[in-house]
Amino acid sequence: MSVVGFDFGFQSCYVAVARAGGIETVANEYSDRSTPACISFGPKNRSIGAAAKSQVISNAKNTLQGFKRFHGRAYTDPFVQAEKPGLAYEIVELPTGSAGIKVVYLEEEKCFTTEQVTAMQLTKLKETAESALKKPVVDCVVAVPSFFTDAERRSVVDATQIAGLNCLRLINETTAVALAYGIYKQDLPAPEEKPRIVVFVDMGHSAYQVSVCAFNKGKLKVLATSFDPTLGGRKFDDVLVSYFVEEFGKKYKLEIKSKIRPLLRLAQECEKLKKLMSANASQLPLNIECFMNDIDVSGSMNRGHFEEMCDSLLSRVEPPLRSVLEQAKLKKKK
C-alpha cells in the first residue's frame, strides 16, 4: 500500500508519492504539480482545483478559497471575524458554534463545515494520487502549519476521514521542508560529527514560518521554530489592491470597495504584478479591460515604491528569524 503526502496550503496544494527510489510531486489532470485550494459550487455540479479557480469571478459567492484557516475555530473567533469582510462567500455560525460556509449548490442553499469543505479538496488530491499510482490510496500524511493548535489539527484529521483517507500522522510544514532538504543530501556530517545547522524560511500565501534544524547522516533534529501566522503573500497583494482602489477611484470616479467582482479581478491582477516586480525593478503597467461600468483602467507600479508601501510588513520578517536564533542559541555571522 502506498502512503501519499499531501501539502494542503491556503492557496495551493501538492501531492507527493515515494517511487523509483525518490519522492515525486505528481501532476494533476492539467499536467500541473500545483492544484489550487479552491472549490466552486454550481447549479449542476461542483468543481475543484483549477476548474474552480476559473470561476472565482463569474461565480464569486459560491467559490471557496482560503478555507484552510477556519479549521477548529469558533464563528466568534477574532480571526474568523477579521476574515469575513474580505470574503466573497458567506461564513455562518453552525449549531455547534463553529464557523461554517454557506453556498448555493444544485440550486439549494447548503451549509458546510470546514472539515467537509477540506474533505472535498482532499478527495480531489486523492484522485490525483490514484491516477499517478494506478492503484487505490488510503494511507496519507498531511502537512500542517507549525502553529496549528490541537483543535485545528484534530479538525484536519476529521477532514481526512470524511475523504475516506487514513491519516497516519500530521507533520509540521517546517519539519517537512527540512526533511525534503535532508533526504537527498549526500554530504551531511557523520552521526558522531558536529551537525550542519540550516535555517528554513517559508513565506506562504497566508503565513510565515521559520525553523532551525541540525542535520547528520540519517538524522534530523528541529532545534527551534517561530512564525507570524498572519504575514503572507496575500498581505502584500492587499497593499497593491488598496493602492489601486484609491487610484482608480480618483482617476476614473469608481466606487470599487463595495463591489466584490471588480475587487476579485483587481486582486488577481495585483498578484500577477507582484510576481513580475520580484524579477523586474522597472515601472510595470497594470491594465484591466471593462473593469467596471465598461471602463478600461490602467495604472503602474515599480518595485521601489511597492517596497516602501510594504515597509510595515517587511519589518515583521526579522523578529521570527531573531527568535529562532535565540531559541537555538545561535549567533549571526557578521
Image (cartoon, rainbow, N blue to C red):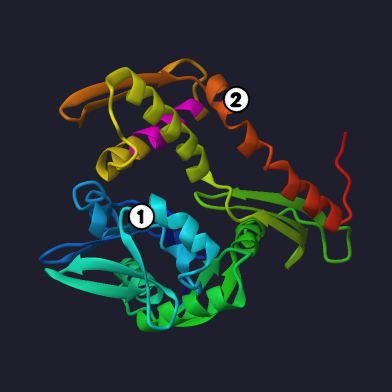
Task: Give 138 or 201, whichever is nearer the viewer.
Answer: 201
| Foreground pick, 325 / 82 | 82
Q: Residue 36 carries which label?
A: 1
The residue sitting at 32% across, 77% down in the picture is 135
Along the line of sight, the residue nearer the viewer: 156 or 82: 82
Task: Decide whether residue 331 is among the magenta residues.
Answer: no
Which mark, residue 308? Answer: 2
Q: Where is residue 133 in the image (x, y as percent from the top left)?
A: 35, 70
- Helix, strand or loop status at disc 2: helix
Disc marking residue 279:
none
Q: In this view, does 96 lie above or below 174?
A: below
| Mark 1 neighbour class, 10 Å CA radius: few under 14, some 14 to 19, many 20 or more | many
User: Horizontal and vertical percent for residue 184?
Assistant: 62, 57
Residue 208 appears at what percent x and percent y?
61, 51
Mark 2 is on which residue type? Answer: Glu
Say which quarter of the image contains residue 290.
top left
Which quadrant: the C terminus? Answer: top right
Q: How far apart are marks 2 and 1 (CA)?
A: 30 Å
Tell me the magenta residue range. 268-277
Q: How many residues crowd mark 2 within 10 Å: few (<14), some (14–19), many (20+)?
A: few
